[in-house]
Amino acid sequence: MSNTQKRLEAVKQQLSPEQEYQDAVDPIRSMNEERAKAAFDIRSLTYLLDGGEKNTFLKEKIMQELERDPLFKMDDIFDLTTSEVRERTMAKFRSMLHHLQNEPVDQFKKRMEIVSLVDPGFWTRFGVHYGLFVGALQSNATPGQLGYWFERGALSLNNFVGCFAMTELGHGSNVPGLETTATFDEASDQFIIHTPTLTATKWWIGGAAHSATHAAVFAQLIVKERRYGTKCFVVPLRDPKTYNLLPGVNIGDIGKKMGRDGIDNGWIQFTHVRIPRGYMLQKHTKVSRTGQVKEPKLQQLTYGALLQGRVTMVADSGHVSKKALSIAIRYAAVRRQFAPSGANGIETKLLDYPIHQRRLMPLLAQTFAMLFTGTEMTEMYNSMMARLDGAREGDQDLDEVMEMLKETHSTSAGLKAFCTWNCLSTIEACRQSCGGHGYSAYTGLASMYQDFAVQCTWEGDNTILTLQLGRYLISSYREALNGKKLSPGVGYLNNLNKLIGKRCNAKALEDVLDLDTISEGWQVVCAHVVKNAATEFEECLKRGLNADDAYEQCSQARLYAAKLHSFSYLFNRFADAVKKTTGDLHVILRKICLLYGLYTIEENAGAFLQFEYFTPAQIEFVRASVNNLCKEVREQAIPLVDSFNLTDYIINSPLGRKDGNVYVHYFEQVKRSNPQSEHPYFDRLIKPLIQRSTEENDYEEELAGLEDDDEDEE
Amino acid sequence: MSNTQKRLEAVKQQLSPEQEYQDAVDPIRSMNEERAKAAFDIRSLTYLLDGGEKNTFLKEKIMQELERDPLFKMDDIFDLTTSEVRERTMAKFRSMLHHLQNEPVDQFKKRMEIVSLVDPGFWTRFGVHYGLFVGALQSNATPGQLGYWFERGALSLNNFVGCFAMTELGHGSNVPGLETTATFDEASDQFIIHTPTLTATKWWIGGAAHSATHAAVFAQLIVKERRYGTKCFVVPLRDPKTYNLLPGVNIGDIGKKMGRDGIDNGWIQFTHVRIPRGYMLQKHTKVSRTGQVKEPKLQQLTYGALLQGRVTMVADSGHVSKKALSIAIRYAAVRRQFAPSGANGIETKLLDYPIHQRRLMPLLAQTFAMLFTGTEMTEMYNSMMARLDGAREGDQDLDEVMEMLKETHSTSAGLKAFCTWNCLSTIEACRQSCGGHGYSAYTGLASMYQDFAVQCTWEGDNTILTLQLGRYLISSYREALNGKKLSPGVGYLNNLNKLIGKRCNAKALEDVLDLDTISEGWQVVCAHVVKNAATEFEECLKRGLNADDAYEQCSQARLYAAKLHSFSYLFNRFADAVKKTTGDLHVILRKICLLYGLYTIEENAGAFLQFEYFTPAQIEFVRASVNNLCKEVREQAIPLVDSFNLTDYIINSPLGRKDGNVYVHYFEQVKRSNPQSEHPYFDRLIKPLIQRSTEENDYEEELAGLEDDDEDEE
C-alpha cells in the first residue's frame, strides 16, 4: 500500500456513511482511478500519433495561443444567432492573418488543422479564400497571371477576398454540365460572364454573401459559338472600397444551414458581366486575342491539386473522432447509473457496462485506424505530387506517374467517403451514449454532428466517390487478368489465383486472433467482391450495354467492393503502423488493432461467410473475442483518450473535461449561458391564456337573437 | 396517342432546340411523368394507410385548419432565434386549447399526431402538460385527488400549467435511484421536498423554464426515516397570477438544444419546499395522517400507462419517415445530373440511377413496415389496456393479463428502439441523397434530424430498451423449454425443435422470392440468436454470477437477439397486412414487402449464413433480387409517396413540393428568408482588415531605440 493510499484509507475511516458514499462516486476521483490504470507511456503515444515530439510541442503552443486569443472565445458559441456567429467569424480573420504573415507555411497548416477542430465554420470561411480561391489560381493560372493576382492582394487579403464559384443551383457533382457561360467577345477582347437560367445560379458559394471581392468562376468557355467545356475565370464581384456590388452582379445570402453558420454562403447571378480576356486563367487552355483556342493534351496532370481536400479529410475524420470520443469516454468514466446488489448503493460507471464498452471501444479502435491511415494517405499524396509537379508531356516515366495519380485519386475517393461516414456515425454514437445530456447544445456533440455532416457531401459526394473507387477496382481487376503489375493498394488483385477460394487455415479458434490472418481474410474477401463486381460489369457489356451504362448497372456491386476494399485498407495501414512499434505501446496498439480487425469482420460477417473464409464457428468466436477485447481496451480507455492530447478549450464540452468534474462544469455552463431573468413573455402570452374567467370556458350555447325552437312549441 | 399527347407533340414540333431541351428537363413535366405511372389507385392506398376513408377526410380537414391558422405559420421557422421560437410556440397554446375544448378526444389525438409532424417542438411543449402531467395524475392520483386537481384547472389550463419533473442531472434511466427527497413531517402534516445535491437537480424538465405553475415531482418518499422508493408529488412552482417563483423553488433555463428549441426545458432545485400531505398522489402507496405507509401489492398493474409513449413512437417513426421520403423521392424525380451519351445532353433523373434507387427504395419499404406495425402495436396496446384497466388483485385471469402486459412491454421496447433508430437514419439518408441542398435549413431535413434525434433517448434510452427485450426473449426461451405456451409475438420459440438447424427448402433460387420463405427464415435465425443468448446467459450463471450480472455479461448477445427479433416482427406485421389486400394494391404492396424482407436479409446476411438457413448462392441471389426490386418499386415511387397524402404545408420543404417545381420554390424561399440588404458589418469588420496600407504589411525590423550591433562593428 502506497503512502497516498494509506492516507486515503485513514481519511476514509473518519467519514460518515454519506460522506463515504459521496467520496466513492466523486467524479474527479473516478477519473483519477482511470488515469492511474495506464499500462503504457501516454506521452509516447501522443508523439507517435502527432508524428514526433516536435509536432506535439507545436500543437500545444498553438492550442495555448488559440485559447488565449480573445477573438477565439468559444464557450458562448452555442447561443449566437446566425448573424452574430457570422460577425464573430469575420473578426477572427485578423488573428489568422497575423499568423499567416509571421509563421512558416507548415506551421500555419498545423494551425489550420487545429482551428478546424475548434471552429469548423471559421475554418471553412478562411479556407475558402486560402484553400479554394488561391488554390484555383495556383492550379489554373499561368505564372504571369499568378503574379498579377498576388500583386493585386490575392494572397495578403489586401483589398481582396476571394471565393470559389463552382456549384450551381442545378449542378453539383456534374461539373462539366455547369450552365454559366463565358463567351469571348473578340471586338472588345473581353469575356461575357452570364447566368442563362435559374438553375445556372451559382449556389452555396462560401464567402459570397458578405466576404468576397472576387470569385473564381467556373463557366462554359464559348468562342466563336463553339463550346470548349468548363474553365476558370476571375470575376470581380464588389468594389473593395465600398463593398457595393459591381454592375451585372446579383448576390444574395443562402441563409441558415444545418451547421457551420459562420460561413456566409451565397448565391450569385451574372448578367452579361464583362471581364478582360486575361481574367480567364490560362495555364492549360489558352484563348488568343483573335479567338484561337489551344487546349492541353494531358488535362489529367492538373487533377492532383483537386485531391488535396479529400486527402486532408481522411486525417480530419480521425481528428474529429478523437474529439467526440474524448467527450463520450471521459463522461462514461465518471457517469454512474444503477447499483448492483451488494454494492452499498454505489452505482456502476457506464464504462464498466459491457454494452457501453461495445458502443465506444470499436469506435476508439476505428479512430486509430483513421489516424494512421490519414498519415499514410498524406505521405502518398505528397510523394505523388512531387512526381507530378515535375511531370511534362512526353516524359519517359509518365505512365508510372499517371498510375500513381490514378491510385491516389481512387484510394482517396474511397477513404474520404468511408472515413467521413465513419466519423459522422462516431459523433452520433458518442452523442447518444451520453444519454439525454448528449442532446444539450452545451455538451458539444450536437453541433459537432451538424458541422461535420457536410463533409459527406462536399469535395465529392460520398456515394459518387465510392463508385469511382469501385470503377477503379473493376478496371484494376481486368488489368490484373491481363498480367499487369498493379499499384500496392490493389496489389492483392495480382494474386487472384491464391486468394479466390482460400479458407482460413487457423487450426485452433484462437489462431484467428492474429493480425496477418485478419489481413489475409480481408484480401480474400476483397478479391471475391471485386471479382463479382467485375463479372457483373462484363455481363452487362455482353448484354450490349456501353461501358458507362454497364458501370451504372453494377453500381451496387461497385459500392460494396469499394466499401470492403476501404475497410481492408484501413485495417492494413493500422496493422503496418502497429508493426513498427515496440514495448508497452506495441502491446496496447496491437490489442486495439485486433479489436478493429475483428469488429469489422463481425460487421461484415456476411461476406466472410459467403466466401467461406471463416466458418460459422469462427465467426461466433470472432463475436466473443470482440466482447473480450472491448473489455481489455476499456481498461486503458482514459489513458488512450488522454494520449489524444486535446485541451479542455479544444474539446469545449463540460462532459469531456479532463478533471472529470462534469456536473459542476455542466451546471456552470448552463447557468452562465442562460442567466435567470424576469419572465420574458408572461404578461403578453401566458397571462391571457391561463387567467380566463370560468364563464369564458363554458361555451354556453348562445342563440344570438335567434328564437329557440323549443320555446315555439310551448 | 391521347389528345393531350397529340397536343404536346404538336407544340414540341414548333420548339427551338433550346426550348425543347428546357421542356424535356422541366421539373413539373418530370413530376407529371412519374405521377402518370401509377399502377394502383393512390386514394385506396391512402385509405388503407390511414385506417379508412373517414380518417383520411379527418386528417385532410385538420391539415387544412393548421395551414390556415396564422399561429401555425411554419415557413419562417428556420430563421427564428431560440427566444423567438419559444414565444411562437407558446402562442400556439391558444389555438390548440380551442380545439381541445371543442372536439372529441379521438379527433384531438389525430390533430396532435399531425401537429407532431408540423412542429415537433410545440407538440412536446403542449404534450408535457397534456400527456405527461395529466398522465401522471391519471396514473397516480386517487379519484378524489384527480377531481381536486381538475377543479383547480389542471385539465383546462385555468391558472394552471403542469410539467413532469422526473429526470435529474445525475439520474435518467435509473428512476429508483433519483435523489430528490420527500420527507413526511408529521407535526405539520406536510411533505418537505428537497434537492440534497447538485446531481439531484431536476434536469431537462420540459415547460419548467417558462411555462409551468405546477410540477409532478418524482422523489424518494421518506417517512419516519425509512425510505419507500420513488413516488409522485404535485409541487406548486410559481404563483399563477404573477409567475413569480414560490419560496424554496429555484428554476433556470436549460437553454439551447440540438433541436425542439420551442420547448422551454428547465432545471429545478427545491430547498425545503413544504406541500400538504394530500399533494402526494396516493392511488397506489398511501401515507396516513400518523405516518402509516400502505404499499400496493401489484405495482406492475400501474405500468401500462407508461407504455403509451413508446407505442406511439413506433407509428410516429413511420410518419416522420413518410415526410422525409416525400422530400427525397420527389426531389430525385426531378433532379437531373449527368447526361449519358446519346441523350442529347438531357441529364438522367436521380431516381433512374440504380444506386439512388438502392439508397431510397429500401427505406420506402421499411416505412411501410413501420406504418403497418405501428397500427398493429397500437391495437395490441389498446386491447391490453382494456384488460388491464379492469384488472384487480386476485382476479382469475390475472396471469393472462400480466402475460399480455409483459409482451406489450417488451415488444414495444424493442420496436421503439429500432423504429426510432430506423427513422433517424432514414432522415439522414434522405438528407444526404439531396446532395448539397440537403444541408440547407430550408429544405427541412436538417431540422427534421435535429428534432427527431431525441426520440432515441427519451421515453427509455434505446440501448436499454433493446436489452429489456433481449431479457424477455431469454426468459421466454427458458419458459418454452419448460413447456410453457408463449404469447404470439414469441410463439416461434415454442417450435425450437423444428426451427433450429432448419435450412431453406427452396429448390430453385427464385423460390426465395416468397413472403412465407422469408418469414420462416427470420424465425429460424431468431430462434438461433435467442438460443445463443440464452446459452451465454446460462453459462454465466454456471460460472457463479447472479442473474443480474449474468444478464449484463451477455448484453451484446441480448442486443443482437432483440435486433433480429424486431426486424422479423416488422417484416411479419407488414406481410400480414399485405395478405389482407387484393388486386392492384396487393401487387404493389407484395412487391414492397418482398423488397423489405430481402433487404433486411441482405443487411443481416451474416446471421442467415452463420445459421445456414441460406446458402452463399442464395444470398448472392438475394442481393441481385434487391437490385431488381428497387428498380421495380422505383417505377411507382411517386404514386407511393403521393399516397402518404401529406400537403405541401406539412412537408414544408421546397424540395418536397408536390408540383415538382423545386428550384423556383427553393430560390423564392431563400430570397424571402434572406432579403438583400446593406452590408451588415463592412465598415466595422472588413474595411479595417482589407484596406491596409502597404507599409503596414512589411513588418520592417524596428530597433525601437536600440542601437544596431552591426553599426558597432563599423
Image (tube, coloured by chain):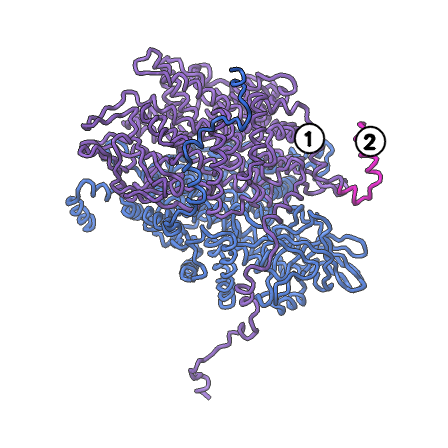
Chain colours: A blue, B purple
Q: Is residue B588 left or right of residue B107?
A: right
Neighbour tally class for label 1: few under 14, some 14-19, many 20 plus, Cα within 10 Å: many
Q: Nearer the viewer, residue B512 or A479?
A: B512
Mark 1 or mark 2, which has the lower sequence index?
2
Q: Is residue A319 left or right of residue B334?
A: left
Against B229, residue A24 (above or below) is below
Badge 2 amino acid: Lys
Q: Is residue A495 visible?
A: no
Neighbour tally class for label 2: few under 14, some 14-19, many 20 plus, Cα within 10 Å: few
Q: Nearer the viewer, residue B603 or B705?
A: B705
Chain letter of the residue beneath label 2 in the structure image: B
Magenta run includes residue B240: no
> How far from the left and from the top, in percent, is residue B352?
67, 35
Splitting the image into 4 quarters, where does residue B282 fall? top left
Magenta run includes residue B5: yes
In the displayed image of the protein, which residue is found farthest to the top? B396
Residue located beneath label 1 in the image? B35
> How far from the left and from the top, in percent, is residue A301?
66, 55
Against A451, residue B71 (above or below) is above
Residue located beneath label 2 in the image? B6
SS of the residue at dot 1? Answer: helix
- Which residue is found at the position 46% from the left and 86% from the top? B711
> How far from the left and from the top, in percent, is residue A619?
45, 30
Q: What span is colored magenta in the figure?
A: B1-22
Splitting the image into 4 quarters, where does residue A624 fall? top left
In the displayed image of the protein, which residue is found farthest to the bottom? B714
- Which residue is found at the position 72% from the left and 36% from the top? B29
SS of the residue at dot 2? Answer: helix
Q: CA distance from mark 1 to mark 2?
A: 19 Å
Chain letter of the residue beneath label 1 in the structure image: B
Q: Main secondary structure of the magenta part?
A: helix
